[in-house]
Image: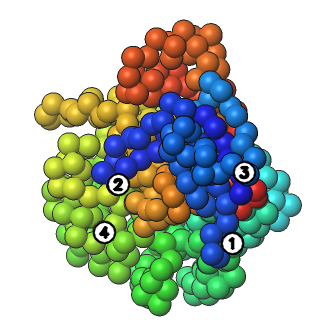
Amino acid sequence: MRAWRAAILRFADDGHAVYDADGLLVVGPDAHGRQVVRAVGPYQALARNYEGVAVEHLPGHIIAPGFIDLHIHFPQIDVIGSPAAGLLPWLENYTFPHESRFSDDAYSNELAVFFIDELLRHGVTSVLAFATSHPASVNALMGQAQQRGMRLIAGKVLQDRHSPDGVRDETQQSLIDTESLIQRWHGQDRLGYAITPRFAPSSTHAQLQGAGALAAKYPDVWIQSHVAENLDEVRWVRELFPQSRSYLSVYEDFGLMRGRAIYAHCIHFDDDDRALMRSTGAAAAVSPTSNLFLGSGFFDYEGAQRIGFKHGLASDVGGGTSFSPFHTMLAAYYVGREGQTKPGVSLSPQNLWWQHTAGAAQALGLEGVIGNLQPGCEADFIVLDPKATPLLARKTSQAGSLDELLFSLIVLGDDRVVTRAHIAGSM
Ligand code: GUN
Ligand code: ZN
C-alpha cells in the first residue's frame, strides 16, 4: 500500500463535494489486484491505522479524482481551431481530410502517444473517444492506453455514406471490423469498446441496423454518436429519415438507445427527446467549447434538470478548443447562464466539477469505479497546485469556502494547475 497526505476532494453519492483540508488517501490492491482507494478521510483520524504505510506529504496541494472526458476525437488534435461557417463545412473542409491520414499505422501510433500525453498533462485520466474509420487508429489508441494502464473506451467510426474517399467505409466490412475490435479489446485490462456510428447522416440504414444488432449481441459494450448538434444537420436528418419522430428517435429506431449509450451535444431537443434519454438510460456528452466555437447552440441545462436525464462534460476536441477540463467547466458555466427562451441556471462549481468526474462516470455506467476517490474506486487521481500562477495564488489564498476555491480554479485554472496524474494501473 501507499498513501498521500494533502487536501482531498471527492464526491458523496448525492453529488456534493466532500473536502478534507488535511486528508489521507490510502491506495492498494483489492481482491482482484486492481489498485483502488483503500481508505480516505481526515489525516488525523486515519493515520494511526496505517502506520507502516509510506506516506508522501504534499503540503499546499489538492488531490482530486482524475477528470473524465465523455466525448473526444483522438484523430482531431490538429483540427483544433479550424474555423468554418458551421458543423457540415467544418467536417468536409478540415475534419475528413485530416482523419484520412489515420489509415497509416505509424502516423496513428505517433498521434496516440501525443494524445495520451496531452490528456494526462491536463489531468484527464479516462476518456470515451472516437478513433477514425480505420481499424489501425483503434489499435493504436487502445495499445497506447493499455501500456499506460488507463481506463479508456474507444471505437472505430462507422460512416458508409455521405463521406469522402479516404474515410468512407464499406457496410459489411465495417461491421466485421467492429466485431473483431470488440473481441480484441473490450474488457482487456481497463479498456472498453464503443460501437461508433459517426452520426445518422453518414450511415446507411443497413449500417445502423448492423450497429444495432452488434449492440444487442454485446450488451455491455458502449455506444457513442452525435445528435442534434447543428440546425442544418437536424434538417438533413429529417430528409434522410422521414419515418423517425426526431433525430434522436433515429437511434432509438435502430436499437442504439440504452444505458452505456453516450450522445454528444443533444442541443436541439424537445421534451420528448429528453424523456427518451431518461427512459432509455442514455446520457448526453455536453461539449460547450465545441458548441460555442462551431456556433452550434447551447445545451439546455434547465431542460436536462427538469426532465432528469444523465449528462456530463466533454471537450469534443477538435470541434472543442481545449483539452483542459477547467476550460470546459467554465464554458459550461457560461452556457448554463444562457437561457435562450427562459432564464438560465447558475451551475455551482461543485456541480460543474461533478459533471467532469463522478457525474461523467455515472453517465458511463462506471459510478464507484472511476471519477471519484471513495473507498473501492480505482485510484486514478491528480495532484493540483492551487498556487500555480501568481493570480491563482492570490485568489485561492482568499477563498473563504470550498465553492470559492473551486470556482477560482475553474475560472483561472488550466494545465499549469495539474502537477501530475496517477493512473491506478501504472502504480
Ligand atoms: N458530427 C459528425 N462528426 C462530427 C465530428 O467529428 N465532430 C463534431 N463535433 N460533430 C460531428
Ligand atoms: Zn464529436
Residue at 37% in and 32% down: 349
Q: Circle 2: is it few (<14), some (14-19), or many (20+) Cα within 10 Å?
A: few
Q: Circle 4: is it few (<14), some (14-19), or many (20+) Cα within 10 Å?
A: some
| Residue at disc 3, secondary structure | loop
- Pick the quarter of the image with the C terminus: bottom right
Name the mark on residue 33.
1
Tell me which amino acid carries mark 4: Gly
Residue under pointer 3: 53
Cα distance in 3D space between marks 4 and 2 = 18 Å
N-terminal-most mark, 4 or 1: 1
Dot 2 and dot 1 residues touching (CB under 8 Å):
no
Between residues 203 and 307, which one lies in front from this camera angle? Answer: 307
Tell me which amino acid carries mark 3: Val
Residue under pointer 2: 13
N-terminal-most mark, 4 or 2: 2
Tell me which amino acid carries mark 2: Asp
Dot 4 and dot 2 residues touching (CB under 8 Å):
no
Cα distance in 3D space between marks 3 and 4 = 42 Å
N-terminal-most mark, 3 or 4: 3
Check the image and report above or below for 262 versus 25. Answer: below
| Residue at disc 2, secondary structure | loop
Tell me which amino acid carries mark 1: Gly
Check the image and report above or below for 205 versus 271. Answer: below
From the viewer's perspective, is 38 left or right of 2?
left
Residue under pointer 4: 281
Cα distance in 3D space between marks 4 and 1 = 31 Å
Cα distance in 3D space between marks 2 and 3 = 28 Å
Q: Estimate the x, y position of residue 97 in percent, counting from the top left.
A: 66, 53
Q: Circle 1: is it few (<14), some (14-19), or many (20+) Cα within 10 Å?
A: few
Q: Quadrant of residue 277?
A: bottom left
Q: Estimate the x, y position of residue 17 in percent, counting from the top left.
A: 39, 41
